[in-house]
Image: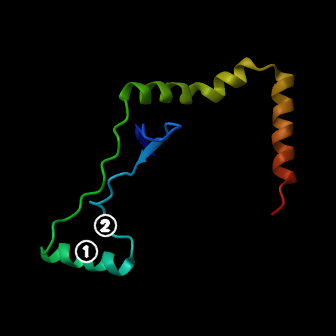
Amino acid sequence: MKFSKVDIKSPVGILVAAMPDRSKTRPRDPNELAHRIFLESIGEVEKTDPPDATPKNPHAVALGRMGGLKGGAARAAALAPKKRSQIAAKAAKARWDKKP
């Protein structure tokens, strides 16, 4: 949810939430949606495009991938064998203690 402005008329200065613009999306009701798809297929109304996803920062994606690729192996190498054994035993106990 995005906050657009502060209501200055209010004595406490409440933030007013801006509703997202969903006027270009398809209806949620199955019957209305079917009708809308039919109208789009015969050219009565314009086709609706899916909302654009916010693009990801390629540098942040690369950094996250670099850390994710070496994370578990680097952590295991840094742990002492006794500590690794304790972690593994705790994980095995958690798996076996689950009720189906």
Pointer 2 or 1: first along the chain: 2
> Relative to 51, is 35 above or below?
below
Using the image as rendered, state which of residue 63 and residue 86 is in the foreground.
63
Residue at horizontal 25%, vertical 74%?
37
Left or right: 81 as drawn, with respect to 15: right
Packing grade of label 1 (10 A; few <14, some 14-19, many >=20) is: some
Q: Helix, strand or loop at disc 1?
A: helix
Residue at horizontal 44%, vertical 44%?
16
Left or right: 90 as drawn, with respect to 71: right
> Relative to 85, is 27 above or below?
below
Quadrant of the image containing the C terminus: bottom right
Q: Which residue is mark 2?
A: 26
Q: Helix, strand or loop at disc 2?
A: loop
Expressed as whole percent of the image width and height from the top left, the position of residue 72 reads 65, 29
> Relative to 19, is 59 above or below?
above
Quadrant of res 26: bottom left
Quadrant of res 57: top left
Mark 2 residue type? Arg
Mark 1 residue type? Ile
Name the mark nearer the viewer: 2 or 1: 2
Expressed as whole percent of the image width and height from the top left, the position of residue 58 reads 36, 29
Left or right: 25 as drawn, with respect to 60: left
Quadrant of res 67: top right
Say the numbered circle drawn on residue 91: none
Residue at horizontal 32%, vertical 78%?
32
**Tag 2 near tag 1, CB within 8 Å:** yes
Q: Which residue is mark 1?
A: 37
Expressed as whole percent of the image width and height from the top left, the position of residue 54 reads 35, 41
Expressed as whole percent of the image width and height from the top left, the position of residue 81 reads 83, 22
